[in-house]
Image (cartoon, grey):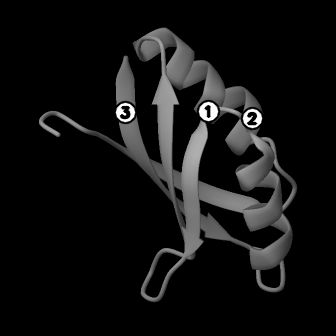
Amino acid sequence: MVRAYVLIKVESGRTRDILEQLRELPAVERADSVTGPTDLIALVNADDPRALADLIFRSVQTMQGVKETDTRIVVDG
């Protein structure tokens, strides 16, 4: 099992739409809107690193309005 935090920057006005889409994904344990340079943070779970990459590249980055993602894998927790 791989857990990671995905920091997401989105286009202006798209935060709520993307947040709702993230929360519908089975791999997303939690997704929140935050302050600072990142608009959203999602805690995700995947079976292995390849599944994590698929989730990020095929599900998150393809959402209309997502500008950038930055993934931080949990190493102890």
| Residue at the spot 74% in from the left edge and 28% down from the top edge | 58
Residue at 80% from the left image edge and 41% from the top image edge: 62
Relative to 25, is 32 above or below? below
Which percent across, then down, holds residue 3?
37, 33
Q: Nearer the viewer, mark 2 or mark 1?
A: 1
Q: Is residue 67 above or below residue 63?
A: below
Neighbor class of circle 3 (other Cα within 10 Å; few <14, some 14-19, many 20+) is many
Graded by Cα atoms within 10 Å as few (under 14), some (14 to 19) or many (20 or more), the crowding at tag 1 reads some
Q: CA distance from mark 3 to mark 1?
A: 10 Å
Q: Secondary structure at mark 3?
A: strand
Contact check, label 2 and label 1, Cβ < 8 Å: yes
Residue that mark 1 sits on:
27
Tag on residue 59?
A: 2
Residue 31 coordinates in the image, percent (x, y): 58, 60
Instruction: State the CA–CA distance, disc 2 to disc 1.
Output: 10 Å
Q: Secondary structure at mark 1?
A: loop
Task: Report the amino acid beneath label 2.
Answer: Ser
Residue reaching furthest left? 76
* Pointer 3 or 1: first along the chain: 3
Q: Residue at point 36% right, 23% down?
A: 2
Label 3 to label 2, Cα distance in Å?
A: 16 Å
Name the residue tied to disc 3.
3
Residue type highlighted by circle 3: Arg
Please provide percent x and percent y for residue 44.
Answer: 50, 40
Q: Amino acid at mark 1?
A: Ala
Whether residues under marks 3 and 2 lie with C-beta atoms below 8 angstroms apart, the answer is: no
